[in-house]
């Protein structure tokens, strides 16, 4: 719930600074959070995990859009999307480094006794749960594949 309080303060400062990119990104966050709050029947509060998932989804959408714009030689639009992704990412918890992700994946592989790609689902499930909000799912997936193939 602290997300909305922080968000309102950030919105006000972005309006004062006339920062249109930041303002648009913050409005997207507020819209997504309010939609999520009203979507559930009877649920009015979002957990911190739910808020993190919403923010991650918004960042991923912006990055995917930027990639598409770059493929279509629209660098101006891609730069805007990337800037918005950076603004949204500021509200996420600090992201783990690749080395930290590798260490956690190695621990999970050791715990589960995973031996190959057939165990990827088991390892990914545990890794995604343990690093929720702290690492991108795509990065986790790449590292898990590398470790299980290696």
Image (cartoon, rainbow, N blue to C red):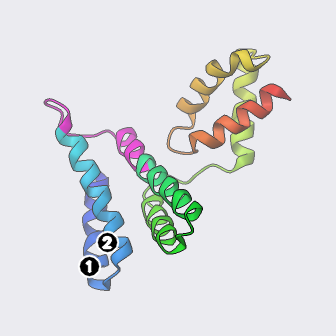
Residue with the mark numbered 1: 15
**Upstream in sequence: badge 1 or badge 2:** 1
Element marked by disc 1: helix
Residue numbers of the magenta segment:
39-55
Q: Could you tell me if residue 85 is visible in this image?
A: yes
Q: Secondary structure beneath disc 2?
A: helix
Which residue is farthest bottom?
17
Visible residue check, residue 92: no
Q: Residue at x 62, y 18 (%)?
A: 122
Q: Which residue is mark 2?
A: 23
Outermost front residue: 72
For label 1, the crowd category at 10 Å Cα-Cα, with few meaning under 14, some 14 to 19 and many 20 or more, is few
**Residue 124 image-quadrant placement:** top right
Q: How many marks?
A: 2
State the image quarter where residue 31 is shown.
Answer: bottom left
Residue 44 colored in magenta in the image = yes
Instruction: Find residue 105 and report its horizontal and vertical position in percent.
Output: 71, 32
Q: Nearer the viewer, residue 96 or 140?
A: 140
Question: Taking 89 as reference, is 143 left or right?
Answer: right
User: Magenta stretch containing residue 9, yes or no?
Assistant: no
Front-lying residue, 109 or 136: 136
Residue depicted at x 48% and y 69%: 83
Look at the image and tell me in which quarter the C terminus lies: top right
Q: CA distance from mark 1 to mark 2?
A: 7 Å
What residue is drawn where x is 68% and y is 51%? Answer: 97
C-beta proximity under 8 Å, tags 1 and 2: yes
Left or right position of 65 against 73:
left
Tell me residue 54's x, y (percent): 37, 45
- Residue 110's place in the image compared with 65, above or below, is above
Query: Who's the residue at 35% across and 39% down the image?
Result: 50
Task: Estimate the x, y position of residue 112 in percent, counting from the top left.
Answer: 70, 16
Left or right of residue 57: residue 24: left
């Amino acid at each position: 719930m602290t997300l909305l309080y922080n968000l309102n303060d950030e919105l006000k400062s972005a309006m004062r600074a006339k920062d249109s990119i930041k303002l648009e990104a913050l409005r997207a966050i507020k819209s997504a959070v309010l939609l999520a709050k009203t979507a559930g029947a009877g649920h009015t509060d979002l957990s911190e995990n739910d808020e993190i998932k919403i923010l991650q989804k918004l960042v991923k959408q912006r990055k995917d859009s930027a990639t598409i714009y770059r493929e279509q030689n629209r660098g101006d639009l891609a730069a805007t999307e990337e800037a918005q992704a950076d603004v949204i990412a500021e509200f996420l918890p600090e992201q783990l480094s690749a080395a930290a992700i590798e260490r956690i994946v190695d621990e999970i592989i050791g715990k589960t006794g995973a031996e190959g790609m057939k165990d990827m689902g088991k390892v990914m499930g545990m890794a995604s749960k343990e690093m929720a909000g702290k690492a991108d799912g795509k990065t986790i997936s790449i590292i898990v594949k590398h470790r299980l193939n290696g």
